[in-house]
Protein backbone atom coordinates (compact mmCIF):
# COMPACT_ATOMS: atom_id res chain seq x y z
CA UNK A 1 0.00 0.00 0.00
CA UNK A 2 1.31 3.44 -0.94
CA UNK A 3 0.92 6.14 1.71
CA UNK A 4 0.87 9.82 0.80
CA UNK A 5 3.37 11.93 2.74
CA UNK A 6 2.83 15.59 3.46
CA UNK A 7 5.83 16.82 1.47
CA UNK A 8 7.26 15.95 -1.92
CA UNK A 9 10.68 15.17 -0.39
CA UNK A 10 9.11 12.49 1.83
CA UNK A 11 7.38 11.01 -1.21
CA UNK A 12 10.69 10.92 -3.11
CA UNK A 13 12.29 8.95 -0.25
CA UNK A 14 9.31 6.60 -0.18
CA UNK A 15 9.54 6.17 -3.97
CA UNK A 16 13.23 5.23 -3.68
CA UNK A 17 12.31 2.58 -1.10
CA UNK A 18 9.59 1.34 -3.43
CA UNK A 19 12.19 0.93 -6.21
CA UNK A 20 14.52 -0.96 -3.84
CA UNK A 21 11.71 -3.30 -2.83
CA UNK A 22 11.25 -4.09 -6.51
CA UNK A 23 14.87 -4.98 -7.15
CA UNK A 24 16.54 -1.72 -8.16
CA UNK A 25 19.85 -0.74 -6.54
CA UNK A 26 19.08 2.66 -5.01
CA UNK A 27 21.43 3.98 -2.33
CA UNK A 28 21.51 7.04 -0.06
CA UNK A 29 23.65 8.98 -2.55
CA UNK A 30 21.00 8.62 -5.27
CA UNK A 31 18.28 9.63 -2.79
CA UNK A 32 20.15 12.76 -1.78
CA UNK A 33 20.80 13.71 -5.42
CA UNK A 34 17.12 13.17 -6.26
CA UNK A 35 16.12 15.49 -3.42
CA UNK A 36 18.56 18.16 -4.54
CA UNK A 37 17.21 17.87 -8.09
CA UNK A 38 13.80 19.04 -6.86
CA UNK A 39 15.19 22.58 -6.68
CA UNK A 40 16.41 22.47 -10.28
CA UNK A 41 13.47 21.08 -12.26
CA UNK A 42 9.98 22.22 -13.18
CA UNK A 43 7.74 20.19 -10.88
CA UNK A 44 4.74 21.01 -13.06
CA UNK A 45 6.27 19.10 -15.98
CA UNK A 46 5.45 15.47 -15.13
CA UNK A 47 7.47 14.00 -17.98
CA UNK A 48 10.48 16.17 -17.16
CA UNK A 49 10.10 15.15 -13.51
CA UNK A 50 10.14 11.45 -14.53
CA UNK A 51 13.15 11.86 -16.81
CA UNK A 52 15.12 13.70 -14.14
CA UNK A 53 14.50 10.93 -11.60
CA UNK A 54 15.28 8.24 -14.19
CA UNK A 55 18.60 9.91 -15.00
CA UNK A 56 19.56 9.93 -11.32
CA UNK A 57 18.17 6.60 -10.16
CA UNK A 58 18.92 4.30 -13.12
CA UNK A 59 22.48 3.03 -13.02
CA UNK A 60 22.12 0.70 -16.04
CA UNK A 61 20.31 0.84 -19.36
CA UNK A 62 18.30 -2.26 -18.40
CA UNK A 63 16.94 -0.38 -15.35
CA UNK A 64 15.07 2.15 -17.52
CA UNK A 65 12.14 -0.04 -18.58
CA UNK A 66 11.31 -1.27 -15.06
CA UNK A 67 11.81 2.28 -13.75
CA UNK A 68 9.19 3.72 -16.12
CA UNK A 69 6.76 0.96 -15.16
CA UNK A 70 7.33 1.37 -11.42
CA UNK A 71 7.19 5.18 -11.71
CA UNK A 72 3.76 5.01 -13.33
CA UNK A 73 2.54 2.46 -10.79
CA UNK A 74 3.79 4.36 -7.75
CA UNK A 75 2.56 7.83 -8.62
CA UNK A 76 -0.80 6.49 -9.82
CA UNK A 77 -1.29 4.76 -6.48
CA UNK A 78 -0.13 7.90 -4.69
CA UNK A 79 -2.94 9.94 -6.19
CA UNK A 80 -5.53 7.82 -4.39
CA UNK A 81 -3.49 7.13 -1.24
CA UNK A 82 -4.51 8.29 2.22
CA UNK A 83 -2.66 10.85 4.29
CA UNK A 84 0.00 9.57 6.65
CA UNK A 85 -1.17 11.77 9.54
CA UNK A 86 -3.10 10.19 12.38
CA UNK A 87 -6.65 9.60 11.24
CA UNK A 88 -8.54 11.65 13.78
CA UNK A 89 -10.88 14.57 14.12
CA UNK A 90 -9.51 17.59 12.14
CA UNK A 91 -9.84 19.86 15.14
CA UNK A 92 -7.86 17.47 17.29
CA UNK A 93 -5.20 17.23 14.61
CA UNK A 94 -4.76 21.00 14.60
CA UNK A 95 -4.38 21.04 18.37
CA UNK A 96 -1.94 18.14 18.42
CA UNK A 97 1.66 19.15 19.05
CA UNK A 98 4.47 17.41 17.16
CA UNK A 99 6.58 14.96 19.12
CA UNK A 100 10.23 15.68 19.78
CA UNK A 101 11.20 12.22 18.56
CA UNK A 102 9.80 8.82 17.61
CA UNK A 103 8.00 6.60 20.12
CA UNK A 104 10.56 4.20 21.66
CA UNK A 105 7.95 1.48 22.12
CA UNK A 106 6.77 1.86 18.52
CA UNK A 107 10.32 1.18 17.33
CA UNK A 108 10.56 -2.01 19.38
CA UNK A 109 7.13 -3.08 18.19
CA UNK A 110 8.24 -2.64 14.58
CA UNK A 111 11.47 -4.55 15.17
CA UNK A 112 9.61 -7.49 16.70
CA UNK A 113 7.35 -7.68 13.66
CA UNK A 114 4.18 -6.21 15.20
CA UNK A 115 1.96 -3.84 13.25
CA UNK A 116 1.68 -0.38 14.80
CA UNK A 117 -1.65 0.51 16.37
CA UNK A 118 -1.62 4.02 14.97
CA UNK A 119 -0.37 5.63 11.81
CA UNK A 120 1.88 8.58 12.51
CA UNK A 121 3.98 10.92 10.43
CA UNK A 122 7.46 11.44 11.88
CA UNK A 123 9.36 14.42 10.47
CA UNK A 124 12.96 13.32 10.85
CA UNK A 125 14.50 13.27 7.35
CA UNK A 126 16.46 16.04 5.71
CA UNK A 127 18.88 16.10 2.79
CA UNK A 128 21.85 16.65 5.08
CA UNK A 129 20.85 14.03 7.63
CA UNK A 130 22.72 10.72 7.58
CA UNK A 131 20.79 7.78 8.97
CA UNK A 132 24.05 5.98 9.66
CA UNK A 133 24.89 8.64 12.24
CA UNK A 134 21.51 8.70 13.96
CA UNK A 135 21.12 7.17 17.40
CA UNK A 136 19.17 3.92 17.15
CA UNK A 137 16.62 5.13 19.71
CA UNK A 138 15.84 8.19 17.54
CA UNK A 139 15.32 6.42 14.21
CA UNK A 140 11.80 7.00 12.89
CA UNK A 141 9.59 4.00 12.16
CA UNK A 142 9.59 4.93 8.46
CA UNK A 143 13.39 4.63 8.37
CA UNK A 144 13.85 1.41 10.36
CA UNK A 145 13.77 -0.89 7.34
CA UNK A 146 16.51 1.15 5.69
CA UNK A 147 18.63 1.22 8.85
CA UNK A 148 18.34 -2.55 9.20
CA UNK A 149 19.33 -2.92 5.54
CA UNK A 150 22.42 -0.74 6.11
CA UNK A 151 23.33 -2.86 9.13
CA UNK A 152 23.03 -6.05 7.07
CA UNK A 153 25.16 -4.63 4.24
CA UNK A 154 27.82 -3.38 6.66
CA UNK A 155 28.02 -6.68 8.53
CA UNK A 156 28.35 -8.69 5.30
CA UNK A 157 31.10 -6.38 4.03
CA UNK A 158 33.05 -6.66 7.28
CA UNK A 159 32.59 -10.45 7.42
CA UNK A 160 33.88 -10.90 3.87
CA UNK A 161 36.84 -8.64 4.62
CA UNK A 162 37.67 -10.69 7.72
CA UNK A 163 37.63 -13.86 5.61
CA UNK A 164 39.62 -12.42 2.67
CA UNK A 165 42.84 -11.31 4.30
CA UNK A 166 46.05 -12.53 2.72
CA UNK A 167 49.67 -13.20 3.64
CA UNK A 168 52.71 -13.36 1.39
CA UNK A 169 54.10 -16.71 0.27
CA UNK A 170 57.04 -17.98 -1.76
CA UNK A 171 54.95 -20.59 -3.53
CA UNK A 172 52.97 -19.71 -6.65
CA UNK A 173 49.47 -19.31 -5.28
CA UNK A 174 47.82 -16.04 -6.29
CA UNK A 175 49.57 -13.20 -8.10
CA UNK A 176 50.12 -10.20 -5.78
CA UNK A 177 50.18 -7.14 -8.07
CA UNK A 178 50.72 -4.38 -5.44
CA UNK A 179 53.71 -6.14 -3.82
CA UNK A 180 55.13 -7.07 -7.24
CA UNK A 181 55.10 -3.41 -8.30
CA UNK A 182 56.77 -2.33 -5.06
CA UNK A 183 59.50 -4.97 -5.35
CA UNK A 184 60.37 -3.95 -8.94
CA UNK A 185 60.47 -0.17 -8.46
CA UNK A 186 64.24 -0.31 -7.91
CA UNK A 187 64.62 -2.17 -11.21
CA UNK A 188 63.09 0.60 -13.28
CA UNK A 189 59.67 -0.99 -13.40
CA UNK A 190 60.74 -4.17 -15.20
CA UNK A 191 58.84 -7.20 -13.90
CA UNK A 192 61.76 -9.32 -12.74
CA UNK A 193 60.58 -10.39 -9.28
CA UNK A 194 57.05 -11.79 -9.00
CA UNK A 195 55.25 -11.82 -5.65
CA UNK A 196 52.46 -14.19 -4.67
CA UNK A 197 50.00 -14.36 -1.83
CA UNK A 198 47.61 -16.87 -0.27
CA UNK A 199 44.62 -16.52 2.06
CA UNK A 200 45.45 -16.01 5.70
CA UNK A 201 43.37 -18.26 7.87
CA UNK A 202 41.34 -16.33 10.40
CA UNK A 203 40.91 -18.57 13.41
CA UNK A 204 39.10 -15.94 15.46
CA UNK A 205 35.98 -17.11 17.30
CA UNK A 206 33.42 -14.60 18.53
CA UNK A 207 31.22 -14.75 21.62
CA UNK A 208 28.57 -12.06 22.09
CA UNK A 209 26.88 -11.30 25.40
CA UNK A 210 24.04 -8.80 24.80
CA UNK A 211 22.12 -7.07 27.57
CA UNK A 212 18.37 -7.15 26.73
CA UNK A 213 17.11 -5.46 29.88
CA UNK A 214 14.53 -2.70 29.57
CA UNK A 215 17.07 0.05 28.92
CA UNK A 216 19.09 -1.98 26.42
CA UNK A 217 16.88 -4.30 24.37
CA UNK A 218 16.47 -1.90 21.42
CA UNK A 219 20.24 -1.41 21.05
CA UNK A 220 20.85 -5.13 21.53
CA UNK A 221 18.37 -5.91 18.77
CA UNK A 222 20.41 -3.88 16.28
CA UNK A 223 23.67 -5.57 17.34
CA UNK A 224 22.08 -9.03 17.17
CA UNK A 225 20.86 -8.17 13.65
CA UNK A 226 24.41 -7.15 12.79
CA UNK A 227 25.89 -10.43 14.04
CA UNK A 228 23.03 -12.47 12.53
CA UNK A 229 24.01 -11.20 9.07
CA UNK A 230 27.72 -11.49 9.94
CA UNK A 231 27.43 -15.20 10.76
CA UNK A 232 26.07 -16.03 7.29
CA UNK A 233 29.64 -15.43 6.07
CA UNK A 234 31.64 -15.78 9.29
CA UNK A 235 30.20 -18.77 11.16
CA UNK A 236 32.36 -19.05 14.28
CA UNK A 237 29.96 -17.06 16.46
CA UNK A 238 28.05 -17.83 19.67
CA UNK A 239 25.42 -15.35 20.85
CA UNK A 240 23.96 -14.97 24.35
CA UNK A 241 21.42 -12.53 25.77
CA UNK A 242 20.93 -11.66 29.42
CA UNK A 243 18.91 -9.49 31.75
CA UNK A 244 18.19 -11.25 35.05
CA UNK A 245 19.44 -14.56 33.57
CA UNK A 246 21.64 -15.76 30.70
CA UNK A 247 20.26 -17.45 27.57
CA UNK A 248 22.17 -19.11 24.71
CA UNK A 249 20.36 -18.08 21.49
CA UNK A 250 22.78 -19.24 18.77
CA UNK A 251 20.58 -22.21 17.67
CA UNK A 252 17.52 -19.97 17.34
CA UNK A 253 19.40 -17.44 15.17
CA UNK A 254 20.92 -20.09 12.91
CA UNK A 255 17.78 -22.07 12.13
CA UNK A 256 15.21 -19.42 11.19
CA UNK A 257 14.80 -15.92 9.68
CA UNK A 258 15.91 -13.06 11.92
CA UNK A 259 12.49 -11.43 12.43
CA UNK A 260 10.88 -14.75 13.31
CA UNK A 261 13.69 -15.69 15.71
CA UNK A 262 13.57 -12.27 17.39
CA UNK A 263 9.82 -12.46 17.98
CA UNK A 264 10.09 -15.91 19.52
CA UNK A 265 13.03 -14.95 21.70
CA UNK A 266 11.26 -11.84 22.98
CA UNK A 267 8.21 -13.97 23.86
CA UNK A 268 9.99 -16.96 25.39
CA UNK A 269 13.20 -15.59 26.95
CA UNK A 270 12.56 -14.87 30.61
CA UNK A 271 13.55 -11.38 31.72
CA UNK A 272 13.70 -9.87 28.22
CA UNK A 273 12.95 -6.19 28.73
CA UNK A 274 13.17 -6.49 32.53
CA UNK A 275 15.84 -5.73 35.11
CA UNK A 276 19.60 -6.27 34.88
CA UNK A 277 21.90 -8.64 36.76
CA UNK A 278 25.09 -8.42 34.74
CA UNK A 279 27.33 -10.05 37.35
CA UNK A 280 25.07 -13.06 37.86
CA UNK A 281 24.66 -13.52 34.09
CA UNK A 282 28.40 -13.37 33.46
CA UNK A 283 28.93 -15.79 36.34
CA UNK A 284 26.55 -18.24 34.66
CA UNK A 285 28.53 -17.86 31.45
CA UNK A 286 31.84 -18.43 33.27
CA UNK A 287 30.45 -21.50 35.07
CA UNK A 288 28.66 -23.17 32.15
CA UNK A 289 30.03 -21.86 28.84
CA UNK A 290 33.64 -20.87 29.42
CA UNK A 291 34.70 -23.88 27.33
CA UNK A 292 33.65 -21.80 24.28
CA UNK A 293 36.43 -19.31 25.06
CA UNK A 294 40.13 -19.72 24.29
CA UNK A 295 43.05 -17.59 23.12
CA UNK A 296 41.45 -17.36 19.66
CA UNK A 297 38.18 -15.91 21.01
CA UNK A 298 36.95 -12.33 21.00
CA UNK A 299 34.31 -11.72 23.68
CA UNK A 300 31.97 -8.79 22.97
CA UNK A 301 29.75 -7.51 25.79
CA UNK A 302 26.97 -5.05 25.00
CA UNK A 303 25.54 -3.27 28.04
CA UNK A 304 25.14 0.14 29.64
CA UNK A 305 26.74 -1.21 32.83
CA UNK A 306 23.73 -0.65 35.09
CA UNK A 307 23.79 -3.70 37.37
CA UNK A 308 21.26 -4.37 40.13
CA UNK A 309 23.29 -7.33 41.43
CA UNK A 310 26.57 -7.69 43.32
CA UNK A 311 29.44 -5.80 41.72
CA UNK A 312 32.03 -8.18 43.20
CA UNK A 313 30.44 -11.06 41.28
CA UNK A 314 30.74 -9.04 38.07
CA UNK A 315 34.44 -8.30 38.66
CA UNK A 316 35.22 -11.94 39.50
CA UNK A 317 33.40 -13.20 36.39
CA UNK A 318 35.15 -10.66 34.16
CA UNK A 319 38.51 -11.81 35.52
CA UNK A 320 37.73 -15.44 34.65
CA UNK A 321 36.59 -14.53 31.12
CA UNK A 322 39.59 -12.25 30.54
CA UNK A 323 42.02 -15.00 31.61
CA UNK A 324 40.81 -17.31 28.84
CA UNK A 325 39.89 -14.93 26.02
CA UNK A 326 42.10 -13.35 23.39
CA UNK A 327 40.35 -9.99 23.88
CA UNK A 328 37.33 -8.68 25.76
CA UNK A 329 35.51 -5.67 24.30
CA UNK A 330 32.67 -3.76 25.96
CA UNK A 331 30.22 -1.79 23.80
CA UNK A 332 28.11 0.81 25.58
CA UNK A 333 25.42 2.85 23.72
CA UNK A 334 25.68 5.61 26.31
CA UNK A 335 29.31 6.20 25.32
CA UNK A 336 28.07 7.89 22.14
CA UNK A 337 27.42 10.97 24.28
CA UNK A 338 30.57 13.19 24.33
CA UNK A 339 30.05 13.89 28.04
CA UNK A 340 29.80 10.21 28.97
CA UNK A 341 31.96 8.86 31.80
CA UNK A 342 31.91 5.19 32.90
CA UNK A 343 30.93 6.13 36.44
CA UNK A 344 28.31 3.47 37.26
CA UNK A 345 29.59 0.71 39.52
CA UNK A 346 29.14 -2.05 36.95
CA UNK A 347 31.30 -0.26 34.37
CA UNK A 348 33.96 0.62 36.92
CA UNK A 349 34.18 -3.03 37.98
CA UNK A 350 34.55 -4.19 34.36
CA UNK A 351 37.01 -1.60 33.03
CA UNK A 352 40.25 -3.20 34.38
CA UNK A 353 39.53 -6.38 32.39
CA UNK A 354 38.77 -4.79 29.01
CA UNK A 355 40.93 -4.66 25.88
CA UNK A 356 38.51 -2.27 24.20
CA UNK A 357 35.67 0.06 25.10
CA UNK A 358 33.57 1.82 22.47
CA UNK A 359 30.10 3.27 21.80
CA UNK A 360 27.53 1.32 19.80
CA UNK A 361 24.63 3.70 19.32
CA UNK A 362 24.30 4.03 15.52
CA UNK A 363 25.27 2.30 12.28
CA UNK A 364 28.60 4.11 11.98
CA UNK A 365 29.62 3.03 15.48
CA UNK A 366 29.31 -0.61 14.41
CA UNK A 367 32.27 -0.01 12.10
CA UNK A 368 34.53 0.21 15.17
CA UNK A 369 34.14 -3.57 15.52
CA UNK A 370 36.34 -3.96 12.45
CA UNK A 371 39.48 -3.14 14.43
CA UNK A 372 38.93 -6.25 16.61
CA UNK A 373 37.45 -8.57 13.98
Image: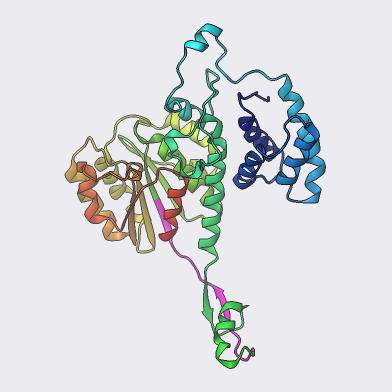
Q: Quadrant of residue 149?
A: top right
What residue is drawn where x is 51% and y is 56%?
A: 158
Left or right of residue 16, residue 85 in this image: left
Residue 244 magenta-highlighted:
no
Query: How far from the left and from the top, in percent, is residue 127?
Result: 56, 39
Left or right of residue 57, residue 9 in this image: left
Q: Kindly tell me whether residue 211 is visible in this rendering.
A: yes
What residue is drawn where x is 53% and y is 61%?
A: 161
Q: Quadrant of residue 14?
A: top right
Nearer-the-camera pick, 18 or 55: 55
Nearer-the-camera pick, 181 or 164: 181
Which contiguous range is marked in magenta? 191-207
Residue 201 magenta-highlighted:
yes
Nearer-the-camera pick, 329 or 319: 329
What residue is drawn where x is 54% and y is 36%?
A: 126
What residue is drawn where x is 46% and y is 49%?
A: 364
Query: How far from the left and from the top, in percent, is residue 294?
Result: 35, 61
Going by the picture, which residue comes out furthest to the right?
A: 65
Amino acid sequence: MVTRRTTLSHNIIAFCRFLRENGMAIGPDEEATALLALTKIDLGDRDGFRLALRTILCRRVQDMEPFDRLFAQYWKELEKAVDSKIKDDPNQRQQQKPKAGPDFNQLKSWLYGNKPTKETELRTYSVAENLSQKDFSMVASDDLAEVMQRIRELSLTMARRANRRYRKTASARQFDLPRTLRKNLRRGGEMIEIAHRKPRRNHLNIVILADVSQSMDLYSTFLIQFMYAFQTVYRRIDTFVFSTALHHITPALKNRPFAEALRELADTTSGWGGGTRIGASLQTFADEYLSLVDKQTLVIILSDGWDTGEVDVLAESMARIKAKAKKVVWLNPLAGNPSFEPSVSGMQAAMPFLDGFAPVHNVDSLRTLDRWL
